[in-house]
Image (tube, grey):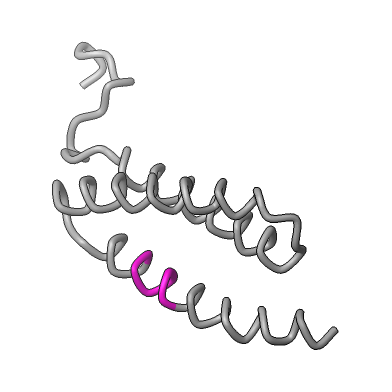
Amino acid sequence: MNKWFVEILVLLPILIICWQFYSFSVSRKREEKQRRCQVLGIVYMVFGVLALVFHDIVIVTMGLILIMMGLRLIAHGLDRMDKRVFIDIYKDDR
């Protein structure tokens, strides 16, 4: 039980820093947001998968959180740049 407490105390600040990078990347605009979100999303996914290698419940939980944050960042990075163009509207509908 004491080992879990120490691991949580070490990993909690790391997760808070990761959340700060996540918030900063999502708050950017246009191409900068797309580039930052895609790169940081891939980095979070890699670290999350690597954390799954360790068979400790605290580290695996952190890895799953990083994977979820990475997938959200990648999804934010796939957002359209020009939101005035709608691809699902037929030209004669206007």
Whether the magenta-drawn stretch holds residue 80 is answered as no
Q: Picture coordinates of residue 85 (x, y %)? A: 19, 31
What residue do we see at 17% from left, 57% from top?
29
Among the 4 quarters of the image, the one containing residue 94? top left
* Residue at figure coordinates x 21%, y 11% from the top left: 92
Magenta range: 17-22
Quadrant position of residue 63: bottom right
**Residue appearing at x 51%, y 73% in the figure:** 15
Decide which of 46, 3 is in the foreground and name it. 3
At which x and y percent is residue 48? Answer: 54, 52
Residue ID at (80%, 88%): 2
Left or right: 66, with 52 as reference point: left
Q: Is residue 74 left or right of residue 50?
A: left
Give the dominant element type of the magenta stretch: helix, strand or loop: helix
Give the vertical position of 40 relative to 82 (above or below): below
Question: Residue 42 appears in which quarter of the rendering?
Answer: top left
Q: Where, quadrant-wise, is the N terminus in this rendering?
A: bottom right
Q: Position of residue 83 (x, y in %)?
A: 21, 40
Q: Is residue 20 magenta?
A: yes
